[in-house]
């Protein structure tokens, strides 16, 4: 990784860690690189009333497909847990969101772990999705008020103080049509968890369950 790339990753990931809660959508500087590209993303209001950055092919029709290949939500980049967000919490978030997505998709589509397992003649979508960041920041803190660090889940510095803290979870996803290997939809989204009392309080999966439930209800509306 060259120096310019390191600087970009450092700044982008720092934004994920201890800032970013003022804006309702993920800033461009916070895009993780999980998606092949971020072209044409536009701010939209979801069915639940939340904001997201999204692009959908004009010809999108969820009824054109009958299989979705999806194994599990990824953690991207490789996370570095700490005392604020431990590995158990990351694993729980990954498992909870994976199960929620499969539950919604399974109401309409056959779910397989790999597109090669789709029945012959199936019209298949591949879902790629990842948690790209977890943050806790002082209430009202601007996303750019940060000190660069190179980790997915960073140590909270003394600068965070003792004020109430907003929590946010960053997600990126895309749907790919296996018939032509083309992306038909992609989204970059930030969901907000429960507010923490101070910088010493650990982030838990429970802090995000209500937000994740709202996220999955939007997925349900999208494929309806």
Image (cartoon, grey):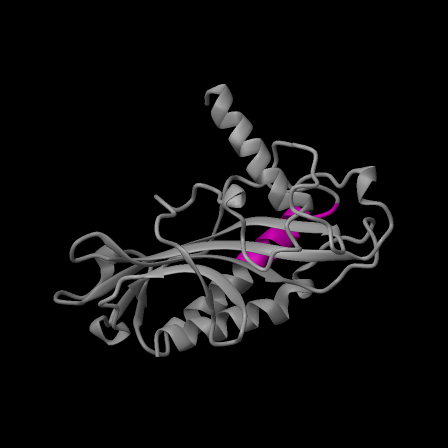
Vertical position of residue 18 compared to residue 8: above or below: below
Magenta residues (range):
84-94
Q: Is residue 110 magenta?
A: no
Q: Residue at x 56, y 72 (%)?
A: 213
Left or right: residue 159 compared with residue 76: right
Decide whether the magenta segment is chiefly helix, strand or loop.
helix
Q: Nearer the viewer, residue 29 or 75?
A: 29
- The spot of residue 132 in percent (x, y) is 52, 48
Q: Residue at x 53, y 41 (%)?
A: 29
- The spot of residue 112 in percent (x, y) is 31, 63
Q: Residue at x 35, y 48 (%)?
A: 39
Vertical position of residue 201 compared to residue 148: above or below: below
Pick the quarter of the image with the C terminus: bottom left
- The spot of residue 157 in percent (x, y) is 78, 38
Q: Is residue 86 magenta?
A: yes
Vertical position of residue 58 compared to residue 29: above or below: below
Q: In this figure, what is the number of numbered marks?
A: 0
Farthest residue, direction left: 121
- Splitting the image into 4 quarters, where does residue 64 fall? bottom left
Q: Nearer the viewer, residue 138 or 81?
A: 138
Farthest residue, direction right: 162
Q: Residue at x 51, y 69 (%)?
A: 215
Left or right: residue 195 compared with residue 40: right
Left or right: residue 32 compared with residue 184: right
Farthest residue, direction top: 3
Left or right: residue 194 compared with residue 7: right
């Amino acid at each position: 990784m060259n120096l310019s790339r390191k600087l970009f990753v450092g700044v982008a990931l720092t934004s994920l860690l201890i800032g970013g809660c003022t804006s309702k959508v993920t800033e461009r500087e916070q895009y993780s690189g999980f998606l092949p590209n971020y072209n044409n993303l536009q701010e939209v209001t979801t069915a639940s009333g939340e904001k997201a950055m999204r692009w959908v092919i004009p010809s999108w029709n969820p009824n054109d497909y009958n299989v979705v290949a999806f194994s599990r939500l990824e953690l991207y980049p490789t996370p570095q847990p700490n005392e604020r967000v431990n590995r158990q919490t990351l694993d729980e978030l990954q498992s909870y969101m994976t199960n929620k997505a499969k539950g919604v998709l399974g109401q309409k589509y056959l779910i397989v772990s790999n597109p090669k397992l789709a029945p012959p003649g199936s019209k298949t979508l591949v879902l790629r999705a990842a948690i790209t960041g977890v943050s806790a920041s002082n209430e009202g803190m601007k996303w750019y008020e940060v000190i660069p660090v190179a980790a997915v889940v960073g140590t909270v510095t003394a600068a965070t103080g003792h004020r109430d803290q907003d929590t946010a979870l960053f997600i990126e996803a895309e749907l790919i049509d296996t018939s032509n290997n083309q992306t038909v939809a992609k989204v970059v989204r930030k969901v907000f968890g429960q507010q923490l009392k101070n910088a010493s309080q650990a982030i838990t999966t429970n802090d995000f369950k209500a937000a994740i439930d709202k996220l999955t209800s939007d997925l349900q509306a999208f494929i309806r």
